[in-house]
Amino acid sequence: MDKMNLVFVIHNHQPVGNFEHIFEMAYEKSYKPFIDVLEKFPKIKIGLHISGPIYEWILKYRPGYIERLQALCADHRIEMLSGGFYEPMLAILSQKDIQGQIKMMNDFIADKFGQTPKGMWLTERVWEPALPLLLDGTGIEYTLVDDAHFTYAGKRKDELGGYYVTDKAGKMLLIYPISQRLRYAIPFAEPEETLNILRDAHNRGFSGICYGDDGEKFGIWPKTFEWVYEKGWLYRFFETISNNDSWLNMALPSEYISQYAPTERIYLPTASYQEMMEWSLPADSIPLYDEFIKYLKNNNLYDKYEPFVRGGIWLNFLSKYPESNRIYRRVLKLSERIDSIKNQKVREEAKRHIYMAQCNCSYWHGLFGGLYLNYLRNALYENVIKAHKIIDDYRGGQWAVSEIVDTDDDMNNEITLDSNDIYCIMKPSLGAGIEEIDFKDVAFCLTNVLSRRLEGYHNKLFNQQDHSEGNEVKSIHDIVKSKESGLQNYLIYDRYQRLSFMDHFLSKDCDVNRMRTEGYTELGSLVDAPYTYKRKDRKGAAYVECEADGIVRILGEELPVRMQKKFKLVSSRPEIGVNYRIKNLSKSEINCYLAVENNFSLLASDSPDRLIVIPTENIRQERFKDVITAIGISKFYLYDGYLKRNFGIISDKIFNLWHYPVETVSQSEDGFERTYQGSAFILVYDLSIRPDEEFSFSISLVEEEAK
């Protein structure tokens, strides 16, 4: 019988926009010590995938690491795997961008390591049946997915081994099934457990089995640095494999393919790893899904029926989180515009920023922060805006234009207002609110605020037990704890998407805390009502007029009103103006508050260089973490010392300001945590409108250089 072959693949990734100290920590605790141990064992071979953000950081701060990898590649001990350079989710990209990202990685690997990649790491192992066709022409011959993918196609895990062949329209791709038993054993169980798994597969007649997983499991996951390195697990693991070379061999992925035929042909459904498919379900479906799995396990049915238990698909995240879909559509449409640029240098520069904005991590949420981390979303917006500005600079001139376009592909038109300085998206279908405001000179999206919403794991906060104690090293999926007590009190869910220039009619006993806790009563019907609209652009200025009829419920009466909102964007300065006019169409007086809600974020809630500045007799400077009420003002500023900008909100009528931080409760690798997403700034106007009379006012959002 031939020797048993272990195909061992490690995937290292950090997202675009992650903090420098996280890159350094990951390098020192995982990427470097793994290679330190690997170099000591000449019989050990691995496939290695490193994402573009890590490569860029290493080249800048630890270039010697590249030289060490080069030596291991030259010694045929490492095979470098390709993939999308900035770790995009291939399932949502155009074929042109898929191939462009892979070409960038292929070229990098060829230049730095002298290898022509034949394999690729599939981001989050999200498989789509069309991938063989989409990858045609990239030089990619194989990839890896979980063995769960194969069980969804009707296979049993105990009959999986080697690699398989699939195709789409005659374009072939080879697929390794990643052993779940190995993935759960490494590095948590003693090395002998891995030997038992390999020996079992060998006894069943297989010549090879594949392991593939995140390199961060080797040092970054909780307690793993101590276990893997300080207590010597990785050393003992490689030593154990090396000492069993009489029947066990480590093979590079391409090496194994060149020596053995595929096990058989397979066609896989759309899938990812099991946890990802659960996370992608609607939040209210997840507890029911968990309950079903628990039922099967309690009745000893799970092992038998597991292949037929599956959650949703990754694309569901674009439905689950409108904020994710919003930036995805922005990237998709901007990429199409860039493709039409004839100047190669300009096109490639803009495209690189688009590729960076395609980094998958901020588009979804599961165990890690992902979409819930505002600085990761900010990195996507920053690169989108930079790409947009490159197009602007190539175009030249000054302009301010509006355009009717379905920006988020929901069959409802949005209106974009675009100038040299500002780009914004207004949604007539949702109260004529603004969902995005970008300031191009600083590549910053001011409206990057995530709504507070139910998550499928929130029920765990009410019956939580901390399972993180003790010395046992566990999978990160099994750790349940909170980073602070009382998080249940922050489980507040928004009734509307967090747009800006949203218009609430409120009773005069309402206050900021009722708004913060969603304890207020909405008297009006216009906050998310559809508006009619007209574009009236002129030279150097874009104008959009919106109008809707609605009601205000006061003392049991439904009083008809008409709301007009006129948006203005000019080419001469970075300023958005909104003129309001509310007409009382009833025969009774309308006496209430009109509260214009804006949701803005400067990312940091408690930093000395991020302040809310309220000009009064004594200038108030407040932090974004605080709940604030300011009476009888006409303007305030958001000061960003990092960007060196003030964002001013100025009105021609006196208003009261209500401010509160928008904070979510989400799970992360360190447990449940409260995360600042942005702030609600509510401009409250006192309305007393007699029948057939009107109340009008204006609000301007202005960007200024901070002194």
Image (cartoon, rainbow, N blue to C red):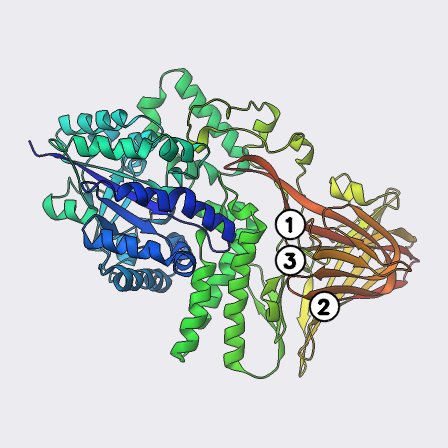
Percent position of residue 427, x then y:
64, 60
Label 3 crowd bin: few (<14), some (14–19), many (20+), radius 10 Å: many
Q: Which label sits in the foreground, 3 or 1? A: 3
Q: Which label sits in the foreground, 2 or 3? A: 2
Image quadrant where residue 113 sits: bottom left
Percent position of residue 678, x then y:
66, 51
Percent position of residue 258, x then y:
12, 48
Q: Which mark is residue 322?
A: none
Q: Amino acid at mark 2?
A: Ala
Between 196 and 450, which is closer to the camera in this rendering? 196
Task: Please say if the residues under marks 3 and 1 sit with CB atoms less than 8 Å apart.
Answer: no
Q: Amino acid at mark 3?
A: Thr
In the picture of the structure, the residue carrying the numbered disc 1 is 497
Q: Amino acid at mark 1?
A: Gln
Q: Is residue 552 left or right of residue 9?
A: right
Q: Secondary structure at mark 3?
A: loop
Q: Is residue 481 left or right of residue 109?
A: right
Residue depicted at 47% across the width and 29% down the height: 289
Residue depicted at 34% across the width and 44% down the height: 270
Residue placed farthest to the top in the image?
A: 299
Label 1 crowd bin: few (<14), some (14–19), many (20+), radius 10 Å: some
In the picture of the structure, the residue carrying the numbered disc 2 is 706
Residue 306 sits above or below residue 283 on the image = above
Label 3, label 1: how far apart the Cα atoms are: 12 Å
Label 2, label 3: how far apart the Cα atoms are: 19 Å
Label 1, label 2: how far apart the Cα atoms are: 31 Å
Q: Is residue 515 visible?
A: yes
Percent position of residue 114, x then y:
22, 61
Image quadrant where residue 190 sits: top left
In the picture of the structure, the residue carrying the numbered disc 3 is 447
Q: Is residue 151 visible?
A: no
